[in-house]
Amino acid sequence: MEFDCQPIPPDSFTGAIMAVEGITDAAVLLNGPTGCKFYHGSISESLLSRAAYLDPLYYSEEFYFGQPRVPATYLDDYDYVFGATQKLEKILPVVAEKGHSLIVIVNSPGAALIGDDLERFIKNACLPVPCLAIENTGFSDAFATGFQDAVIQVIKQVDPTPGTSPTPRVNLMGLSIFHHHWQGNLNELTLLLNACGIEVNTVLCAGTTMARMENLATAGCNLVIHQEYADKLALFLKERFHLPTLVPSVGAPMGFEATEAWITEVCENFDLDPAPGMAIIKKARNRSHEVLNRFNSLTGLPKGATFALVADASIALPLVTWLYTYLGMVPVAVKFVETVDCFADALTAFLHRIDCADALNADIVAATPDIVLGSQADISRQRLAGYPFAGIDISLPAASHIHVVEKSFMGAQGTLYLIEKIINGLFRKM
Amino acid sequence: MKIAIYGKGGIGKSTISANLAAALSLSGKRVLQIGCDPKHDSTRLLLGGRKITTALDYMKEVPVARQRLDGVLHQGFNNIVCAEAGGPEPGVGCAGRGILSTFALFERLGLDMERFDVIIYDVLGDVVCGGFAVPLRKGFADRVYVVTSEEFMSIYAANNILKGVKNYDGEEHRLAGLVLNSRGDSEDRTPVERFAEKVALPVVRTVPRSDRFRQAEIMEKTVVEAFPDSPEARVFHGFARSVMENTTFYPAFSLDEDFLEQTIFMGREPDPAIEIPAREAPETPVETVADLATGATPVFLSKSMMTREPLHGCAFAGALATTTQVVDAITVAHGPRSCTHIAFQAIFSAGLRLHTQKQMLVPNQLAPAVISSDMDENTVIYGGNDTLARTLETAVEKKPGALFLLTTCPAGVIGDDPDAAVREIRARYPDLPVIPITTDGNLRGDYMQGVLNASMEGAAALMDPTVQARPDRVNVIAEKNIAYNAEDNFNTITDILGQMDIRINCRFVRNTRVKDLKAFLRGGLNLPAYTDYFGRIMADFLKERFDSPTASLPFPVGFTESKLWIREIAAFFNKEEKGEAIIEIFQARYETLIATHRNALKDKRLMIITYVHNVDWIVEAAFDLGMVVSKVCILNYSQDNRFTTRYPGRFQVETDYPPHQRDTDLKRLRPDILVGNYTPKTLPFPVHVDTIPMCPDVGFYGGIAFARRWASLVKSPVNEGWKNDGI
């Protein structure tokens, strides 16, 4: 058999659920079968924990099926024929009792086809808590599309009041709980922004609250982390609230140079001095030099080590650039998961400049890189090929490692963490 | 003969179908009429106005285990057998899906279509979605009549129906003609005649407008029954004769809508800008294709399906977890990417855990060979057969040993016809096994049903029934692919069998190949990994289908089970001496382990709350250690329903245990150790808690492995400090 088994990434359905589950006091109510429920219930709880206990008996009531998250109408064949009226009428009050600030009914792809009138159920239920319906999250659309569409619907429901803030304040956009180490990344970026006197207002939507969502129009601007997950949203916020959006030209703040450029652009936007942020990065650079100096003098590495990368364009651009220019590593395979033209084009041009154009969309297995940065599914596929290499899981699904100390891939500490992973990976491979 | 009668809603299809059925039955034919209209009145005149339970209502009200054909089939006029699909109220649900479900029910209950000379499908007005097109699929209607009147909307609907027929016709044609149900003698029949001419179809029968139809309806009878000698009845007797004698079928042509309006109704010459469809002359008469349904499907249903419990997971995911165990096969998943992603993640997670915890690389779990058709919005609206055909073609290019096809809920709801795509691929690649598996997401069952279907319809379809058993070879069946210790357990079993010079022939279905499945019957005995509900069904299936015997005992856990298991296998292969020698070796070590921990655990009270229905492996260890088993509480579990024990009377047992009773029992029994599958949130008083796996490690030491753990557990503080740190 000549089959190259590729990972199957999530689509817009998962994107929509992750958007809502990224709001700590909002809840998805899934109008769909348990087959769609269990995965999303499990992953949303693992990415943003809300429950104190995991004993399924504690969540044994109808609709929850032993999980604290994503209650579902457990549609079956009969419901597809006759509609889910009875179950919807029954589940809404049950979920409403849980104390959420918002309930979002999301149709599964199958349920979207039978056309249950969710708005009518919501109206008739007279719930004490706001509730909205997403009747169709799309079929095989990009994760980012489902994510942004859901965020927009939530904002429309919240209908934030426009306002101003006396201090520089930004909404962070394009970050979901489905981004690996989202919390650590958020902490790092908040640290840098705060150091420069910029407050983080609302994060759309990773670990935010409904109160923060209501407040989002008081920010001075939106600041994009991953453009793929923010482009539609930016247009919407511009149109609805006249909120400008800053898309740093370097992509996500990964690697020292991109992080410096990122914080500098943000500070320029507010006419602030980036020096405090730069000082944090400088300290990390010093530590980096100390470690790399020793490692390099003993091994000659990481210079000349090869790497493959599978990532969204907003990650790929800064990471490939940094790995090449800062660590001296050579790209042999680069693949985009989701793309935006500006970053994809910039990276393509960069690869041409460094005489590595062949790396774009090259087969990772055939390229036999020393380091693979991607999801654990990408890394596992490489592992099966039998070549020695080191894998760094920068996206989901991640390795089965239980992280106690929060990690980051962004900002100063995130860059140090990547260096740690790279040099240890190369060291083990020697 | 299987006749589909289509036409616009309200055009009189049911009246025509019922009268045709009556006339056919009076000519000595055994007739079945199936109403495929949600308003379920197709057979009313054949049943004297009697209301019958529709198939869909029956499915809802009667548990699967008690469902019988006579619950949905009803005897009508002159022994005509009548059935109604039924369906939702207008504006809710999906009536097309209802028709699919009805036909699936008939198939499952083993409706033998061969019992009838004629089957009539009376189908709702327009071919609005895949569900209503079910009678057009291969194996269902072999001839189609389209009912129309002289009115525009009726002809418009007839034209749409021809489009539907065209989509489902292959090389053979099934259109027998138009039936004109006239609105009266004064009506202008020119549009119908023009339409018939342009689509190259004859008007095979004209049913005149007559008050006798109304009178018969008041009597709740057909005209054929109520006015047997009337001219109207004679029309139907003539129609019945022509139906039976007809051997001419026509290709389906439909007209462009503008062309239809201008030419048929306005009598104008067609606008040259409008492309007129090419017309072919009717083909040489062909015999009706007798590609009939295969008849009864054995009923092997999951526990949830049998008992109508909420479905846990979906058949699609269960099937994918199974078919991807055939390492040289590719599975095509027809549906949106989310469905495949979710199922993929479950498989991948198990593989990842194996790699992380046991450094074991299992390729088909880390990189399962699956291709998603990535059904998009357009596919959902316009049907996914083309997308599916392309995806299957892509899979074939990879040169797999076999190709499995699974469908998701959306594919099932829109009524895609995967069998048609499969037939096409099979015709082009006759040497490649292409095997569709009944899934439709969860429309055809839960996760376990998918596992069952993939094993029985999928992997078993590859088995060569002519293969003979070879000496000292066994098959392993009913392993749990999501159990992280499945490989370890398999290795333990392989090792024990190896000591008896017994080889494993095939794993059904785990980490296997097409050639191993083909040679499955070389294994003279099947060894079930579990004899839970899944294991029992697999054993029954292999016995029934291939007369392949299965050992009575599952992979053993604990000392006694291991001993008995070895003896059973040894006896089957006449290797008793070797078996006893193995037992002797393990016994000495087991007794040493017991002696080591007995002092620490003697007289300690153990309470067990678990989903696992066989706890003897752990109870045995407890008894051997001198512990007291206070109570065993068995929770309801979607995958099993039979609690058994070798120790009746030695401990309290409560099956279907209500979780809320736990605290009362704890206060009453005061166990030293509470064992369950999860650590509970809160307890009424401090107690040592431990977890046991859903799938324990097999072998002599499976139970006693916990002795060491418990011996240290009882020495640990009953409350750990970290528990006070919660928010």
Image (spheres, coloured by chain):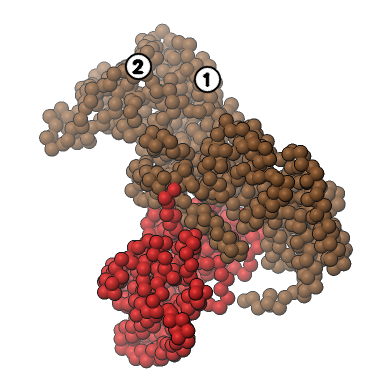
Chain colours: A red, B brown
> Image quadrant of residue B489?
bottom right
- At mark 1, the secondary structure is helix
Amino acid at circle 2: Thr
Q: Mark 2 belongs to which subunit?
A: B
Is residue A35 rendered to the left or right of residue B544?
Answer: left
Query: Upstream in the sequence, badge 1 or badge 2?
Result: 1
Report which residue position mark 2 lands on.
Answer: B247
Compared with B453, A123 (above or below) is below
Number of the label disc, if any, that sits on residue B115: 1
Instruction: Give how far across and how far down residue A82 sits, in percent.
Output: 49, 42
> Residue B610 appears at what percent x and percent y?
71, 56
Q: What's the distance in space between the residues labelled 1 and 2, CA to CA?
A: 22 Å
Helix, strand or loop for disc 2: loop
Task: Say which of A4 and A368 sits in front.
Answer: A368
Residue positioned 33% across, 28% down in the render: B171
* Residue at left offset 52%, top offset 74%: A428
Q: B505 above or below A131?
A: above
Residue B355 against residue B303 in the figure, above or below: below
* Residue B216 appears anywhere in the view: no
Residue B152 is at least partly visible in this image: yes
Position of residue B62 measured from the top left corner of the image (x, y, whole percent)? 61, 36
What residue sits 52% from the left and 64% below the top?
A44
Q: Identify the residue at horizontal 37%, vertical 43% (top origin).
A: B393
